[in-house]
Image: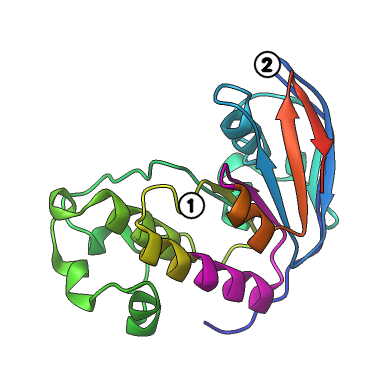
Amino acid sequence: MEGFVSNGSLSIRQLEIGFLRDVTVTVPPGEIHCISGKSGSGKSRLLRAVADLEQHNGQISLGNTRQTDLSGPQWRKRVRLIPAQSEWWYDNVLEHFQVEPDPSLLSALELNSDILKQPVSYLSSGEKQRLALIRSLYPQPQALLLDEPTANLDEGSRKSVENWLLNMIRQQHWPVLWVAHDQEQINRVASHHWDLENGCLTLTG
């Protein structure tokens, strides 16, 4: 991919959604802020609010562009959410891509280019997860919201995807919110680590 410089920090101010209150965090370009917390603590819902997929209060912006300045689809082209369970609408893999991925992208995630010709029903959960990450690059985002992006992968694939993500984030200078539960992974990838508990986001590292 060609180099792309993010438009600025991802800023969340006094966000409220459900039982989450006064969530405030700023993620500078090229930094990864990991969020952990118990099941049901609101981690995925927080990402969905930042992606403008759920109604919420508070202010969210990317650089000088406020979330409210754009329609939901326009915002999500810039601030890209990759959910824990990827969605697939068509029968075949390639139909889900605006542009056919470069073979080097597939190879970097240990995928053969022939996988693009397969029916989605033939894919494993790990293959779907890796393809969803590649799909998220088209059109190029300016920030990423990652909801446990390596959860369905075996140890070898997990490390490959993790390294690939780190390289992409550094190259493209994306601000990233990354929901994770593995403390060792958090130690490897996080610029900062936040814990979500009782509706509050607390910086722990």
Q: Quadrant of residue 32?
A: bottom right
Tag 1, which secondary structure?
loop
Question: Where residue 18 sits in the image (x, y, percent)?
Answer: 68, 16
Q: Amino acid at mark 1?
A: Pro
Identified at 65% across, 62% down, the residue is 188
Q: Quadrant of residue 109?
A: bottom left
Label 2 neighbour load within 10 Å: few <14, some 14-19, many 20+: few
Left or right? Give the position of 200 relative to 122. Answer: right
Q: Is residue 61 above or below residue 32?
A: above
Question: Where residue 116 sits in the image (x, y, percent)?
Answer: 21, 68
Label 1 neighbour load within 10 Å: few <14, some 14-19, many 20+: many
Q: Nearer the viewer, residue 164 or 188?
A: 188
Left or right? Give the position of 64 relative to 152. Answer: right
Q: Is residue 197 visible?
A: yes
Q: Is residue 20 above or below residue 141?
A: above
Disc 2 target residue: 18
Q: Is residue 53 visible?
A: no
Number of numbered discs: 2
Q: Is residue 52 above or below residue 159?
A: above
The numbered mark, 2 or 1, whose residue comes first in the sequence reads 2
Q: Marks 2 and 1: which is nearer the front?
A: 1
Numbered mark located on residue 66 in the image:
none
Q: Nearer the viewer, residue 173 or 6?
A: 173
Disc 1 target residue: 149
Tag 2, which secondary structure?
loop
Left or right? Give the position of 97 relative to 51. Answer: left
Left or right? Give the position of 49 relative to 182. Answer: right
Q: Marks 2 and 1, Cα distance to the nearest angstrom?
A: 24 Å
Residue 192 painted magenta: no
Identified at 28% across, 49% down, the residue is 125
Looking at the rendering, the stretch of residues picked out in magenta corresponds to 162-182
Question: Where residue 184 sits in the image (x, y, percent)?
Answer: 60, 54
